[in-house]
Image (cartoon, helix red, strand yellow):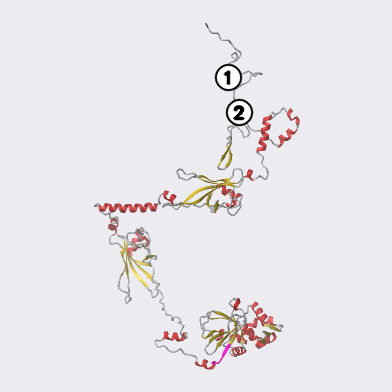
């Protein structure tokens, strides 16, 4: 019996496959049930620099939605038109839909730029990038003691944060990447790092680790140049550590030296196995056998008792060796050893090995192009000057270098007689007695001026002195400087001063003393009021003298120019206009006026004028000059 299918209300509907393939009429009650994905994708992500937006706009889409076409932009004319409520009845243009109007408002809001932009808007996505490195110690490693680790410092202008990251190197064996995460990094001295603290060539400290900034990118230089008005220093080279230096290829010099060692070892092995030694200079020997360049040269010995030594230089072209022979004149007083330099190669870089078996640098020898007449070569530390050559040498240089050798005449040095000086005084006795033993084999006592000793036997001139050594303790000290005219010996006594801390008595014993300013012994004319003399390494300023000393100096004015009235009046010729009608002039004022005119008057000269044409009293410190008397004397 056949089974009949009974139609039910659920089974009488249209199959899903049939509805899916047939287009539904646009009538009420007919709806499309095709499922759609309404979920929104997540675009917020976090990286080493902080939060970021991973949204990727597709082709034909805008930032405000998936709407096709351009987003309408609001301007002033459109806003004024929209104020009128009857703009809805304007059928000349298509009216905006609600969705287009919302997109236009959103676009105007997102693209608004204020006149004074905040930092987060003005410097949005602007980052300063610096290249830096820090030094990391390596312990218990025989190959290296430290390691240089390169990193990049990023400074975000929008919020003043910094980040330090180390580029990852494959198979480095170290944890690399973000070294310091993005945040505001504090300075050791207080505050936070800003872009003004970052520049090329400085070292900054980040959490007790020193980073040396060596370079920056082009945008960073442009930012400092435009915004900060500052030119950054040029980039620096990152120093090499032992690990990086071991990975670098060898230089040409190292390769050449290695090849030279290998070739030498190869040649030795070849000879040890019965091979023959290569004769590298065989061709040079066959072409230049018995061809010798001859030069005349000399050496100036600048040492004591040195003379000019003449040599003959032979350069053998067959093997590039040099021989030097001495040309000794008759009765030269030197041993007859004619060979100064035995025939061998002359090196430009002489080297002495401190121990046998050590490596020596490659020899650089003198060649024919180094031997030019008028030039010099170094032989055993001596500068040998070439001044002449023979005709064969000239022809060789014409063909070999296209150079014409010159000829320089020899100028004989001037003969100077070296006079021996006398030995210094040993301190015992007088200097004249010690010098007498140097002048004669049998010393004689020095001659003395007997007449002066008899005439000036009891004559002494005394001066009062102070010690101007800029020491507070010596300001109140007073001294008596006595000069004995019989033998020009000098003696110094110190006067007693209350609370000075120094006892009175002899300061310098009587003897002939040298003047450090002139190098000769003191004479009586070196002492006058106002002079500063140095005795026993101490300066003394002569501020006064007794009447006997002043009278003696004025009586013997030929020996004491400062006490000669006629010589002092000669200096006063240019001061007539100052003295005219002045009356009694104080000596200190007269000295200042003369100094303004370029006339220097010492204190003793003013005292001489005051004693002659005025009033002088040393006890009361009074010194005046009568201007009328001086003018009358000048006439």
Q: Which mark is residue 161?
A: none
Q: Is residue 460 magenta?
A: yes
Q: Is residue 559 magenta?
A: no
Q: Position of residue 529 (x, y in %)?
A: 60, 83
| Front residue of 242 and 441 | 242
- Judging by the rendered image, the residue that carries numbered circle 1 is 20
Q: Given the current orientation, which residue lies at the most extreme right position? A: 85
| Front residue of 236 and 244 | 244
Part of the protein shown in magenta? 456-461
Point out the image quarter for the C terminus.
bottom right
At 66% from the left and 33% from the top, the residue drawn is 103
Q: Is residue 145 left or right of residue 363?
A: right
Q: Given the current orientation, which residue lies at the most extreme top position? A: 1
* Label located before the other in sequence (1 or 2): 1
* Element under disc 1: helix
Q: Position of residue 243 (x, y in %)?
A: 43, 50
Q: Quadrant of residue 545?
A: bottom right
Q: Is residue 322 left or right of residue 25?
A: left
The chief SS type of the magenta part is loop
């Amino acid at each position: 019996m056949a089974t009949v299918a009974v139609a039910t209300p659920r089974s009488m509907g249209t199959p899903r496959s049939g509805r899916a393939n047939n287009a539904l009429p646009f009538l009420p009650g007919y709806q499309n049930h095709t499922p759609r994905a309404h979920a929104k994708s997540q675009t917020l992500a976090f990286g080493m620099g902080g939060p970021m937006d991973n949204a990727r706009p597709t082709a034909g889409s805008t930032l405000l939605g998936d709407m096709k076409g351009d987003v309408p932009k609001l301007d002033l004319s459109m806003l004024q038109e929209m104020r009128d409520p009857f703009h809805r009845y304007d059928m000349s243009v298509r009216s905006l839909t609600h969705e287009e109007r919302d997109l236009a408002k959103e676009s105007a809001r997102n693209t608004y730029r204020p006149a004074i932009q905040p930092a987060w808007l003005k410097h949005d996505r602007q980052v300063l990038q610096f290249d830096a490195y820090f030094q990391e110690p390596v312990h218990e490693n025989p190959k290296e003691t430290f390691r240089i680790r390169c990193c990049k410092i990023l400074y975000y202008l929008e919020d003043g944060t910094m980040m330090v990251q180390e580029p990852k190197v494959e198979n480095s064996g170290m944890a690399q990447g973000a070294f310091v995460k993005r945040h505001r990094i504090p300075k050791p001295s207080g505050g936070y790092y800003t872009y003004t603290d970052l520049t090329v060539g400085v070292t900054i400290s980040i959490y007790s680790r020193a980073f040396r900034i060596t370079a920056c990118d082009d945008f960073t230089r442009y930012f400092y140049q435009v915004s900060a008005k500052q030119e950054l220093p040029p980039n620096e080279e990152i120093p090499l550590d032992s690990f990086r230096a071991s990975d670098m290829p060898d230089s040409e010099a190292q390769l050449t030296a290695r090849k030279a060692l290998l070739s030498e070892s190869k040649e030795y092995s070849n000879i040890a196995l019965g091979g023959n030694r290569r004769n590298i200079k065989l061709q040079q020997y066959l072409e230049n056998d018995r061809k010798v360049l001859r030069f005349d040269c000399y050496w100036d010995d600048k040492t004591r008792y040195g003379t000019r030594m003449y040599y003959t230089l032979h350069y053998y072209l067959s093997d590039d060796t040099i021989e030097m022979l001495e040309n000794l004149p008759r009765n030269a007083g030197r041993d007859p050893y004619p060979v100064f330099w035995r025939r061998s190669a002359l090196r430009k870089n002489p080297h002495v090995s401190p121990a046998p078996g050590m490596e020596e640098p490659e020899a650089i020898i003198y060649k024919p192009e180094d031997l030019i007449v008028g030039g010099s070569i170094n032989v055993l530390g001596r500068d040998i000057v070439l001044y002449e050559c023979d005709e064969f040498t000239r022809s060789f240089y014409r063909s070999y270098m296209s150079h014409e050798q010159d000829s320089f005449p020899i100028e004989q040095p001037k003969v100077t007689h070296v006079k021996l000086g006398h030995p210094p005084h040993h301190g015992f006795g007088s200097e004249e007695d010690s010098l007498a033993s140097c002048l004669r084999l049998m010393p004689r006592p020095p001659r003395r001026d007997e007449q002066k000793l008899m005439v000036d036997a009891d004559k002494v001139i005394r001066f009062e002195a102070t010690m101007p050594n800029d020491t507070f303790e010596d300001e109140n000290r007073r001294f008596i400087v006595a000069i004995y005219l019989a033998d020009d010996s000098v003696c110094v006594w110190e006067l007693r001063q209350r609370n000075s801390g120094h006892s009175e008595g002899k300061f310098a014993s009587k003897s002939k003393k040298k003047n450090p300013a002139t190098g000769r012994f003191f004479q009586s004319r070196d002492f006058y009021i106002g002079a500063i003399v140095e005795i026993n390494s101490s300066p003394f300023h002569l501020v006064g003298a007794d009447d006997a000393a002043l009278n003696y100096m004025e009586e013997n004015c030929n020996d004491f120019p400062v006490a000669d009235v006629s010589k002092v009046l000669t200096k006063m010729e240019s001061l007539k206009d100052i003295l005219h009608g002045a009356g009694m002039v104080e000596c200190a004022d007269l000295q200042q006026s003369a100094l303004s005119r370029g006339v220097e008057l010492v204190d003793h000269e003013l005292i001489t004028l005051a004693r002659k044409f005025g009033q002088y009293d040393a006890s009361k410190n009074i010194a005046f000059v009568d201007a009328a008397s001086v003018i009358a004397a000048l006439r």
